[in-house]
Amino acid sequence: MIALVCAGVLAVVNAVLFALGVLPIRDAGIPNWTQTLVVLAGVVMTIAIFSFLYKDNPFFRAAEHLFVGLGLGISLVVLWYEFYKPDIYDALVVPAFTKGMTVGHDKLILLIPIGLGLMVLLRMSRSYAWVSRYPLAFLVGYGMGFGIQPVIHSNILKQMKPTLEATPMPWFGWAIVGMVAMLLLLTAYFASKGGRLATYLKIASGTVAVAYVIARATERFGQSPEAVEAFASMDKIIIILGVFSVLCYFVFSLEHKGAVGAVSRVGIIFLMLAFGASFGYAVMARESLLIGRFQFLLGDWLHLLR
Amino acid sequence: MRFIKLTIPLLLAFLFGLFGFGIQYVPAPWASDTKELIAHWSRIIGGVAALLGTYSLVHLHRARIRRRQEGWGYSIFFFVGLVLMLAAGAYNGGMWFLSRQVEQSVYDKLYDALYVSAGATMFSLLGFYIASAAVRTFRARSFEATLLLVAALIVMVGQVPVGNLISGYFPAVSNWLMGVPNVAAKRAIMLGVSLGALATSVRIIFGLERSYLGGGD
Amino acid sequence: MHVRWSDPRLIFPLVAAALAFGLLKPQTLPIKPQKPVEAVYRFIELLPQGSGVLLALDFDPQSVAELRPITDALMRHCLRRELHVVGMTFNPYGAPLGQDIIQRVARDPEFRGKQDGVDYVYLGYKPGDMVQVITNMGENMQAAFPQDYGNRPTATMPIFRQLKSLKDFNYIVDLSASSTPETWIQFGSDKYHIPMAIGCTAIIGPDMYVRLNAGQINGLVAGLRGAADYETLLGKPGQAVKRMFPQSLIHLLIVAFVIAGNVVFLWMGRRGKEQKQSRG
């Protein structure tokens, strides 16, 4: 039913567009039928996939399967022109079968990796699948060993360096940081116990946090050179606190009680802020993709956009 | 037989693992040449092995059609798409597939018309669903949920130009959220994940992790 | 037919209507470029003429709406600055897309005189493990890519006279929607000490801030907003700037709905408590 409705809408709208002269697309007054067909095919695929918003239907499923088939075809075509043709056909087959040409030793040796690649394909066989373990052992073993040093360097050392670097700050700055950190930890500790003290501590912590963020964001106050340096140092300390507390949260072999529990709860706060920010960006990303599609439908198809 | 099927591959993985780790610390020209050779060979092995995925997908849809399983008619569309693209790529604007790839051929037109449209639309569907999800599930049920909600709202408003028109605080607070608590949490996650990845690498090299070898012995 | 206010059948048409209105009645919103985007712009501005820039177009049609404007703006900037641009991809589904984007920019009348193989080139896709391909590029670009996307030999291309390996490049920019930036940082930028920036979809943008904070990348262009910032800095507002108005509308719509939903939720919660108290 949905498929029929979509097909009907497409037929009627296109008929109207052709009648009004909007379609076919013209280049300097001359109809460009190729471009028109490209746009119409795109519209059919777009509407077919958007029909899923109402309900799963055959139109959508057909488009989905077509998409998967197209993707596989594209990957094979790209593989041929980007790899098989230059690296195997032009390098080995053409010289071997062309008079006056020979295959160089540096190219003949490529038969070894080609053979290893074919061994990987034996994974499809039930009896000889074990043969694929040899090239896989080479690829995976070498890859794992090769990757250890860059992972340690880029993902651990280079990340720990800014976290643990000395932060320039005057002594009273450290005093304020110490007091605020104590306040946060006490709040986290007493939060689970409840009571009036917990409430007052939560209010105090919240006020300090909001006041800091607003002060940081206030252009006149937050952008003077002294303020910029002080805030940068404070932010670094907040990051250190955040990294440590989130790592503490993820240590599940320790029971999250007492001091560990308090630090973990601070970690949860950082995680919630991070995931909230990530969600905001995710909304931006998805809506951007949607705008692109609407621009195609309203602009390239219906010609309603300036 | 177990020695040939399992022990030797594990031994090879161990030796190549140590070799891969050690060669980065050798400054000699032969080390550089060896790395280049191995990288080249790895590319070729990977390129040939890519056909494995092709076989899996084709076999799956072929079996579905042969056994007349539920939804087998849609598998025909899969083969239509595959054959269409292969034919267009092989035709290569009339020059056929043994020549250089021709620009702006039928293959490129089909790619733009069908694949780009379909691909872009698939993910743009999520634009509707994420809006619906945000409206239906974002509730200030607890302190943590409220934090998540407030952070998301501030970033959503702060990241668009209209946020700056409403108040300069939105983009400023949004940038602070991205640059400080977000960095702290994601850095901790990255450290944890990297340590886990290192542990997995060491386990694979020492033969404690064997899932990459596949089933059987 | 009972329709709740949070029913998708209500939300979907409202989202569509907001987007359509934003596109049909465009407004130009003032854009204040963000610091991470300015950092990329400034770095490219200061690169000497003839410097090599590697654009890794690691995306496919799923992310084209966000990454195409970023790639477009970066390519334009590099060609304006007379830099040598080498494009390539690790995504086979995006290989034709990368060629299309690079050629469209290069054929702009503004860049008349720029030649393929001399000022810019698109190398296309190479299969295999990304780490090994980058390592290959790090030792010898022409061995890694003996031909470009159009199957022309790279050995004779003038652009590779100075750019023999990755180490000869002055800047790497990875345009990605997946985990390729991590690999580029670990095995490309950090290993060969080449400055790097990332252009990415907004989905992975928050994760890239960690790299920015650690100094592993010197700039970040995230999402459509990043593209709009870059177009503004270039002085050539394009698709990204145009899309900021519908983007703003939709964000405000979602925020309004979420706030309204929470007001209702809190009010219902309070009413429920009062009813319980009056009963008990």
Image (cartoon, rainbow, N blue to C red):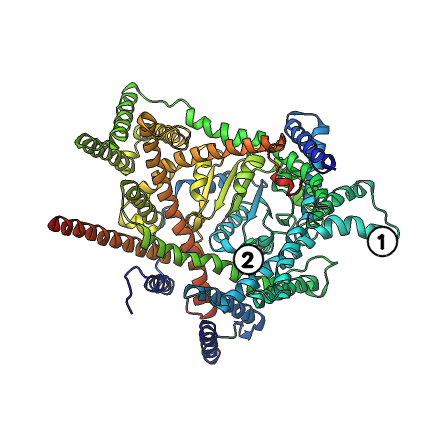
Q: Is residue B121 above or below residue C205?
A: below
Crowd rating for badge 1 (residues with CA inside 10 Å; few <14, some 14–19, many 20+): few
Residue situated in front as seen by the camera: C250 or C128: C128
Q: Is residue A274 above or below residue B90?
A: above
Residue C109 marker: 2
Q: Is residue B16 visible?
A: yes
Q: Measured from the top left, where is residue C261 in percent x and y?
A: 26, 54
Query: In percent of the image, x 56 and y 57: which residue is there?
Result: C104
Residue C53 marker: none
Q: Measured from the top left, where is residue B99 in percent x and y?
A: 74, 58
Viewport quadrant of the C terminus of chain A: bottom left
Crowd rating for badge 2 (residues with CA inside 10 Å; few <14, some 14–19, many 20+): few
Say left or right for C250 vs B97.
left
Viewport quadrant of the N terminus of chain A: bottom left
The residue type indicated by label 2 comes to Pro
Say left or right for A101 vs A188.
right
Residue situated in front as seen by the camera: C66 or B84: B84
Q: Measured from the top left, where is residue A234 in percent x and y?
A: 33, 28
Residue A97 marker: 1
SS state under label 2:
helix
